[in-house]
Image (cartoon, rainbow, N blue to C red):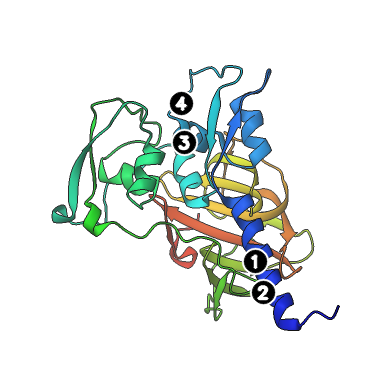
Amino acid sequence: MKVSKSFLRVFLRASLVLMASAVFADTTHLVEKGETLYSISRKYQITVSELRAANGLSESDVLKFGQKLNIPTPDIENAATLNSASVSSGSSYSTENLETYVAQKGDTYYGIARERGIKVAELFALNNLGSDASLKAGQKLKVPAKASQAVAASSLDLKDADPRKYSSAKSSSGLVWPVKNPRITYVNGKVSGVQLSAAKKEKIMNIMAGTVMYCGSYRGFGEVVFVQSKTGLIYAYTGMSSISVQKGDYVVYGDTIGTAGVDSISKESRLTLMVFRNGSPIDPATAPRG
């Protein structure tokens, strides 16, 4: 039987939607004997901090056999926030667009933020909370009024083979980047930052002194390293092929933190750099170096 090209296109698009929903949708996990938050986070390629936030767990909580855990959809902005030492105050919401929410038993910051269509970082900033804050029933929180909720984080865009949106490279004469003489492309969508061309397995240089808050595989981003500066900015180096630092290391300007990887879509050797302030991306070209 001859199959038309139009049918194949429709079938392929439907298949991609099903695969994306299976891979990126929230799911649940039943704890097995011997499992830890760390081993479970590695299985789903997210951070331990995200697991804790999605399940209302503290660092002292111990998992139990058969316990049900919510596995959140990977979100590198939330991951950067939850793996920072602190979150600064300040928010884009005006006072008249806020209301008070009283936390109920079983609530989590992750769940409240998602229900209100904002990032966990924004919820923390609205309430002047640190990233390690605990949540108790009866606690009052400032949240966006439902009539003025921000649109939830964008989902995977399946209109094109590459879901990212690119803009022309911007001039950065004299500006130091993690790799030498890169071709710079601004990208938005699932990723928001700059994509830097690199030589095959080129060494990646840290561009701002700070503490390694997280390093390892992160779903959809390959090997990543988060470095937090003393001012609270998170420098996220993603798409790496190897990592040469460990969580807790203090790295200075010029230190090698790993090697460049290969972009899964373009198949070119590249590095993506994102910089976050309170969980929101800023232009990496304007971020301090040193």
Residue 183, given in percent of the width and then of the height, sits at 64, 75
Residue 194, given in percent of the width and then of the height, sits at 56, 67
- Which-is-in-front pick, marks 1 and 4? 1
**How far apart in space, not on screen, are marks 4 and 2 (Cα)?**
43 Å
As drawn, the label of residue 57 is 4
Q: Are marks 2 and 1 in contact (CB under 8 Å)?
A: yes
Q: Is residue 281 left or right of residue 103?
A: right
Quarter holding the N terminus? bottom right
Judging from the image, what secondary structure is the residue with disc 1 in? helix
**How far apart in space, not on screen, are marks 4 and 3 (Cα)?**
8 Å
As drawn, the label of residue 96 is none
The amino acid type, in three-letter code, at marker 3 is Ala
Label 3 Cα neighbours within 10 Å, binned few <14 / some 14-19 / many ≥20? many
Q: Which residue is mark 2?
A: 10
| Whether residue 273 is visible | yes
The amino acid type, in three-letter code, at marker 4 is Leu
Label 2 Cα neighbours within 10 Å, binned few <14 / some 14-19 / many ≥20? few
Q: Which residue is mark 3?
A: 54
Q: Which residue is mark 1?
A: 14
Residue 59 vertical position relative to residue 118 in the rendered view, above or below:
above
**How far apart in space, not on screen, are marks 3 and 2 (Cα)?**
35 Å
